[in-house]
Image (tube, grey):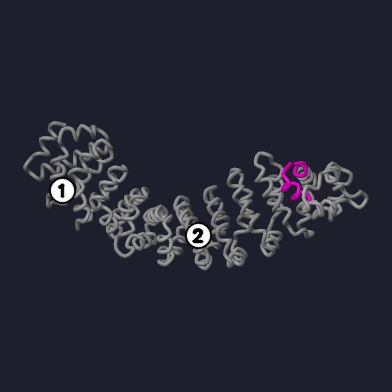
Amino acid sequence: MEPIMALLLSTELEVQKMVSLALVNLLVKNNVCKELVVEMGMLVPILELFQSDDPAAQCHSCACVAMLASCDLNKDTLLVDGIIPLLALAKSYDPKVQQTAAWALLHLTQSDWATRSLCQAGAIPVLVLLLQSSDSQVQFYSCTALCNIAAAQEHHQKLLSVGDHYLSKSLLTLMSSSVLKNSAQACRCLQTLSENALIQEQLLNFGCVLPLKGLLRTSTLQWIESSLTLLSVISAHPANNDILLSEGLLRDIGQLLHHPRTTSVIISQCCNIITDLYGSCMAERAVMESGCISGLLWTLLSPSLSDETLLHVTSCLHLLVTSELIKTKLSRTVTPEQASRLVQLCEQTRNSQLAYNSAAIICKFEMTEEIIQLLRPHRIALSKYLLLFLTSKDVQFQQLAMDTVLKLKKDGDFSAVWANGELEVQLRTIPAQTEESRQPLQIVQLPSQSPVNP
């Protein structure tokens, strides 16, 4: 290290350029101790190279700073003397110098204390301007640095005060980039900022839905998840829902649910968005015209979904079938495999809410001959979970079981299975706990049986 230090102090620029490049390579390969580089005083001649008019020397020194900045112990020293000249280099007209300076600034934003110092020194306007660079790598570095800064809410005011909504506009422009990693990173940055209602209003006014839908159609799951997360934040505010629906968002959500590589995260986010949007007067028609119903049913067949994700799916379906039109569509759409899966979920005991949701969806089926044919092979399984529900201490479960029996007993096969069985006995003995439950209890009795005592 001593010869390197001596060469850095050389008066010959070519020597300094060569040795600074050698030092970059040593730092990249972890062949030297970063703390030792600072302790020996090498940072001073490295920072002095910032003032050189030689782009290569500036690039090499910036690269050294970027590598040294990755060590937290060096950040204090770097911030004292390095921020202002580094910001100046970030505005260089030389693309390579600008790129290396942006890389160094990105490394500095990986520390809370360093980020605070950068913001105080005026780094935010510089990084926002770099989003407009013609170099895609500079765009990526600056956008990632802004993401790191936005992670702390204390910096939001400074981020949002740059120009005339300049950050929002720049990020939206970048979100439409043909370089997908830049588009996804811009989406992530907006997502971090989007808890602010003002930002949401700006995003919708500036046309954020179209580029977000573009990300939903990519093949990279990480970018899809990033887009969905931002859309989920926006859809959580009812004032935004009509705009999202008018842009046809639910059609893209339906397509995602049918995708064979869809993950649990994507499915859960899709369910959240559908649930949020369903509060709009436009939602029923939008759901009917999308592939959301068949998509939600299709996801039930995925063997890898957790109970938590299945709960999202069944809760969403349960909400949707409160609509008569959607209930009719679901009854016509459901396949034998999907009906079987719903019955299976009713039987499981590890998650009572999941069982309730699945049973409630079955109860909402229009009991056409087609639906009855789907359910007949599961007569025994249906009897088991209905009996379990009837013996529950929860009145909601009892009521749901009685409603289901009331619908299914009209079919001769189900009546034959239940005649004089445990289910019938339980129906006759269960107390009529509420006025609401008395009428179904009386109706479901077979003609040969006496009414249930109140």
Of the pair 359 and 454, the residue shown nearer to us: 454
Give residue 290's mark: none
Task: Report x, y in % for residue 73.
Answer: 26, 35
Of the pair 223 and 117, the residue shown nearer to us: 117
- Left/right placement of residue 296 relative to residue 346 reads left
Q: Residue at x 27, y 59 (%)?
A: 129
Q: Residue at x 68, y 65 (%)?
A: 325
- Left/right placement of residue 343 relative to residue 159 reads right
Is 391 covered by the magenta stretch? yes
Q: Residue at x 19, y 39 (%)?
A: 22
Whether label 1 touches label 2, CB < 8 Å? no
Give residue 237's mark: 2
Number of other residues with Cα within 10 Å of mark 1, as a class: few under 14, some 14 to 19, many 20 or more: many
Task: Report x, y in % for residue 316.
Answer: 61, 54
Of the pair 225 and 274, the residue shown nearer to us: 274
Amino acid at the residue labelled 2: His
Kindly state the secondary structure of the residue where label 2 is placed. Answer: loop
The residue tagged 1 is 50
